Image: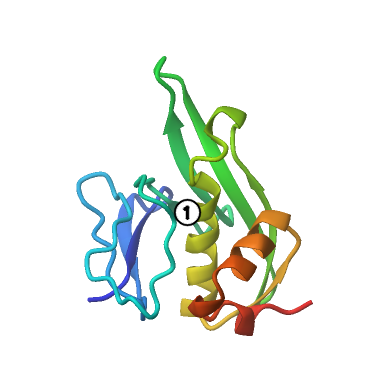
Amino acid sequence: MRGWVGLSRAAGFPHVLPNRTGFYNPGPVHTLLRTTPTPARYCGTGTEPYRVIHNREQRCFTVSLRSGAGVVDSAVLKYQYSTDRHVHLLSTAVPESFRGKGVASHLAKAAMDFVVEEGLKATVSCWYIQKYVEENPGCGYEAHIED
């Protein structure tokens, strides 16, 4: 089955979301890796594999980050539903020590793929998500953005 895998903390089990662009192999730690790239639709996010977890109950995407000292921190992209078919992408927060390393792009990609896969429309308040959509015109995200 094509899709990407996230882990629902509440349910404690992985779930697969359909993805028309390829298959993400979760591996043992649910790392998002593209295993069958489709060049015309592939929207790159860098080379560092980050685990993006979609928590539908808390309406956020998160990446757990570990520094060299073993300190664990999180990067978060928050959203809310305006209606059952419209989401508002609110904010992206990445710890300062991890900025510029592709973490926010992984979060933005996961959120925009969710919008596309679910057939939703989105309003974007976060400057970074807006930038990500503009920098990836071949991914078809623009058709899902409303002002």
Q: Nearer the viewer, residue 10 or 2?
A: 2
Q: Nearer the viewer, residue 83 or 24?
A: 24
Q: Position of residue 17 (x, y in %)?
A: 37, 71
Residue 91 visible in this rendered orientation of the protein = yes
Residue 127, image quadrant: bottom right
* Amino acid type at mark 1: His
Q: Position of residue 64 (x, y in %)?
A: 44, 37
Furthest-right residue in view?
Answer: 147
Task: Examine the rendered structure and indicate whether residue 17 appears above or below residue 25.
Answer: below
Residue 89, image quadrant: bottom right
What residue sits right under mark 1 in the picture? 106
Q: Nearer the viewer, residue 76 or 10?
A: 76
Q: Position of residue 115 (x, y in %)?
A: 55, 73
Task: Examine the rendered structure and indicate whether residue 129 appears above or below residue 92.
Answer: below
Coloration mode: rainbow
Quarter of the figure that contains the C terminus: bottom right
Quarter of the figure that contains the N terminus: bottom left
Residue 84 visible in this rendered orientation of the protein = no
Q: Position of residue 77 (x, y in %)?
A: 60, 51
Q: Residue at x 53, y 33 (%)?
A: 98
Instruction: Tell me if 145 is positioned left or right of 44 in this view.
Output: right
Q: How many marks?
A: 1
Around disc 1, counting alpha carbons within 10 Å, would you say few (fewer than 14), some (14 to 19), or many (20 or more)? many
Q: Residue at x 27, y 70 (%)?
A: 23
Helix, strand or loop at disc 1? helix
Q: Residue at x 22, y 64 (%)?
A: 35
Q: Residue at x 59, y 57 (%)?
A: 59
Instruction: Tell me if 26 is positioned left or right of 140 in this view.
Output: left
Residue 95, image quadrant: top right
